[in-house]
Image (cartoon, grey):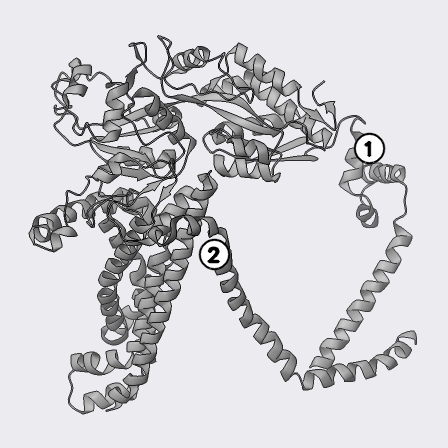
Amino acid sequence: MQKQSKFTPSQSWNARLQRILRHGDRPWQGLIICMSLVVLVLMVAIGWMLWQQSANARAQFGWGFIAPTLSGNWDPVNNIFDSWPFIYGTLLTSFVAILIALPISLGIAVFLAELSPAWLRTPLGLLVELLAAIPSVVYGLWGIFVFLPAVVSPLGNFLQNTLGALPVLNLFFSGPIQVSGSSRLAASLILAIMITPTIAAVTRDVFLAIPLSQREASLALGATRWETIGKVLIPYGLSGILGAGILGLGRALGETMAVTMVIGNSIEGTLSLLKPGYTMSSIIANEFAEAVSPIHSEALVEVGLILFAMTLLLNIIARLLVWRVARKTPAEARA
Amino acid sequence: MFQKFYRVFIVLTLAAVALSACAPAATPTPQVQVQQVEVTRIVAGTPQVIEITSTAAPTVAATAAPTSMPEGSIHVNAAGATFPLPLYTEWTYAYQYVDPSVAINYQGIGSGGGKKAIIDGTVDFAGSDSLLADADYTAGKDLQMYPIVASAVVPVYNIKWSVDLTATPAPTIPPLVLDRTTLVGIYNGTITSWNDPAIVALNPGLKTFLPAAKITVVHRSDGSGTTEIFTKALTSFSPDWKAGGAQSVQWPVDKLGTGVGGKGNPGVAGAVLNSPNSIGYVEIAYAISNNIPFAQMINKSGKTVTANAASLASAMADFANNFTPQLTNTIVDAPGAASWPIAGYTYLILHTTSMTDCVKAQKILEYIKWSLTDPSAAKKAADLGYAVLPSDVQKLVLAKLAAVTCNGNPVLK
C-alpha cells in the first residue's frame, strides 16, 4: 500500500525523464564533444608540459641543440648537450625501416587479398596479425641472441665490401661492423620486421575493401591479373596504403625497447649505418631515471619535445599527402 | 525500454535503503560479544547470520597481546638504487619474520629517482649509489646518508684466445691482469688491440694467447651508480681520463666507433658475452652469476689484487677515517696493498629530524639497525657478493642512526 502511494508522485518524474531523453540530442552531442575534446586536451597538455619543463634547456642551448653536427656532444658531466646524434639516429633508422618494410608488406597484402588460395588466407592472415602483437622486448631479445650475430653482422660486412666501396654511399656504409652486430643497421632491420605486419595487415584490409566491380571492370577490359593489381587496385587503395605506412612510421619513430637493445647506444660521430648509434627515445629511456642535474633532465625533456614535434609534423605532412592522393585517385581509377 | 530500466532502478534503490536501515539495528554489538560469537561459531557450528557480523580483524586484536601491533599494519615505502635491489628484497622478506608488524616496500627506480623521491617526501627512505649534491641538502634540509654495504665493480672480458682450447693437454690460461693506466687507455681508445705492448707487458703468461684483435669497449647506456664508481676510479687512476666521474658520461670510445652501450648490469654482461674480444664493467655479483671472467688489477701500491670480500674490506678500511659529516665516502683507488681499486658504498637516505610518524620512524631505524648488525642479514649480503661494513664504519653509522629524532625525541632507545 505504502509503495503504491510512493509511486504516484514519481510517475510525473518518470515522464519528465522520458521527455528529456526523447529530446536527447543535445545532451548526447555535448557528451560526445567532451569525449573528443579529451584527445585535444591531452595533446595540448603533453605539449605544454614538455615545453614548460624544458624552458631552461631551451634558453641555454638555443637552436644549437638541434643543429646538425657530426661531432655531437652529450656530456652530462660538463652539461654540454646536443641532440643531433639522436635526431639523426631516429630519422635514419625509421627511414631505412620504412624503405624495407613498405614493399615487403605491400607484397604480403597483395598476396593475402588477391592471390592466396582460400585455405591459406585465414591462417596466414592470422599469423601476420600475431606477428604484430609480439611485444617489442621479445624482438629485442631475439635480435641480440639470434638475428644480430647470424644476419646483421655478415650482412654488414657484405655491405661494407660492396656499397662501402662506392663514392657517396661509403658515408653510409663505412665499417667495420662490430662482431656482435650492434649498429644502426640492426635497429633499422628490427624496426622493419616489427612494422611489416602492422602495415601488411592494414594494407590487406584496404585491398579487401576495394569493390569487386573495379576488378571485374579491369579484367573485362582485357587487363591481366598483374595489370589489375598494379594499375587499378594499388592506385585505388593508395591513400589507405599510405595511411598504413604512416602507422608503421609512427611505430618506428617511437619504438624504444627493441631499438635500445640492438642499436649499441653509442653517441658516434659518423653517418654510417654499420656503426652503433642512438635514438631519441632510447636516450630518454636510458638516462631519465638517473638524470641528477636539473639541466640534464631538462635536456632530456627537450629531446622528448623534439620527438613530439617531429611525430606531429610527420603526421601532418603524411595526412596532407593522403588527402592529395585521395582527392585524385577515384577519378583516375574510374577513368 | 527506459521506463522499464527506471522502475528496476527505483526498486533497487528502495531495496538498498531498506537494507541500510535494517543494518544498524542488527550490528551494535559490543566487541566483547563479537569474541563470544566467535567462540560459539567454533564450538557450536556455523549459523550464517552470525558469520556476517563477526569479522577477522577484531578477533586478531582480541587474541593478540595488547602491546604488539597487528601484522603488516605499518607500511614503509622506499625507492631508489637498483644495484642493491636483490639484497634489499632478500632483507625485507626476511625482516617480515623478525618484525611482522612492518611491511617494507622497496622499489628499484634508480638512484636519481630515489634521491628525487626522498627530497619530495614521497618515500619514507631512499636508496642511492650516488651522493647527494649540495643543492639537495638545501632542498631537503635534514637529509642524511647511511652507507649500508659496499660492492666491487670489475672489468669483465671475453677474449677469443689465439690458441686451440680443445687441444690436449688443454692450455691453462691465467686470468687477465690490468693496471690502472692500461684500463684508462682501453676506455680512452688509446689502447685498441688486445696484443698492445702495454697489455702484453702486464701478462707475460698470456703473451702467445692474446689475439691481434680490436677491443670492443662496452659501457652502461643508462645512467647508473655502477658507472659513477667506475668513472670515478678512472678519474683517480690517470689524468688522461678527461670524461669525468658521474652516473652518465661521454665515452671517448663512442666517438671512435668501438664503444657499445648495454642497458643495466645484465645488458653489459650480455653485450660482453656476445662480442668476442670485448671488455666491460659490471657489479661483481653479475660477473659471478653470468660466469664471465673478470680481470685482476694492479692497485695503487703496485700489488696485483682480485676482487673479493677481503680486498673490498681492505679498501673500506683504507678510507675508514675519510667519512664526511654526511657519512659519504669514496673508496676508489685505495692505497692499501690488498685493496681492490674500483669499489663503492651503497647508501640509504633518511630525513633525520622531520619525520612525524614516530612509530614508523622507529620501525625504519630498527630495520636498518637489523640489516647492519644481524648475522643472518650479513650472511645474505655475503651470499649475494656484497661486503658488509667493517666494525669501525658500522659503529659510525650506528652512532648517526641514534641521532635521528622524531618530533624532537630520539627514535632509537
Q: Is residue A204 visible?
A: no
Return the residue at label 2: A51
Residue A65 horizontal/vertical position (percent): 35, 51
Residue under circle 1?
A: B62
User: Of the residues shown, which amino acid type is indicated by label 1?
Assistant: Ala
Q: Are marks 1 and 2 on the same chain?
A: no
Image quadrant occupied by the N terminus of chain A:
bottom right
Label 1 chain ID: B
Residue A323 vs A75, above or below: the answer is below
Between A79 and B15, which is closer to the camera in this rendering?
A: A79
CB-based contact (under 8 Å), mark 1 and mark 2: no
Say the numbered circle drawn on residue A299: none
Between residue A276 and residue A66, name the one nearer to us: A66
User: Where does the image place residue A144, in percent across and percent down from the top left?
Assistant: 28, 43
Q: Quadrant of the C terminus of chain A?
A: bottom left
State the image quarter where residue A209 is shown: bottom left
Q: Residues within 10 Å of mark 1 (few under 14, many from 20)?
A: few
Q: Is residue A121 above or below residue A194?
A: below
Side (left or right) of A181 relative to B396: left
C-alpha separation, residue under disc 1 versus residue under disc 2: 57 Å
Chain ID for label 2? A
The disc labelled 2 sits on which kind of residue?
Trp
What residue is rendered at 63% in x and 26% in y?
B97
* Element on which disc 2 rests: helix
The one nearer the camera, B346 or B234, is B234
Q: Nearer the viewer, mark 1 or mark 2?
A: 2
Please provide percent x and percent y for residue B207: 13, 17
User: Local crowd at mark 2 within 10 Å, few (<14), some, or many (≥20)?
Assistant: some
